[in-house]
Amino acid sequence: MKHKWSEKVRSDDGHSSRKVCERDGCEIVCVSRHEADHRGFAQHWKEWFRGTELIQRGGNTPACEAVEVPA
């Protein structure tokens, strides 16, 4: 099952944005970080959270763990 992402919300400082999977039971948060290193080169990476727990940094998006409701 694929994630059903909310609208992206950008931080006031412009250094990150976040979106949340809206499927019941998943609710994983994807945070995209946008910064520059000491040389001025753009750096971009993603982090995934459930609640306050960091699930993963970088790589492929973790699987959606939504609860399937019988019809």
Image: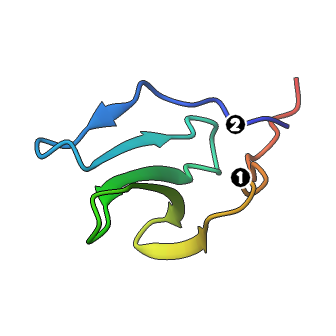
Question: Which residue: 73% across, 57% down?
Answer: 62
Residue position marked by numbered label 2 in the rendering: 3
Q: Toward the viewer: 41 or 35?
A: 41
Q: Position of residue 5 (x, y in %)?
A: 56, 31
Q: Pointers 2 and 1 in contact (CB under 8 A)?
A: yes
Residue position marked by numbered label 1 in the rendering: 61
Tag 2 secondary structure: loop
Q: Position of residue 30 (x, y in %)?
A: 51, 50
Quarter occupied by the N terminus:
top right
Q: Toward the viewer: 17 or 64?
A: 17
- Please tell me whether residue 5 is drawn above or below residue 51 in the rendered image: above
Q: Position of residue 29 (x, y in %)?
A: 49, 52
Question: Which residue: 79% across, 53% down?
Answer: 63
- Please tell me whether residue 6 is drawn above or below residue 38 in the rendered image: above
- The reply, left or right, for residue 66 in relation to residue 7 is right
Quarter occupied by the C terminus:
top right
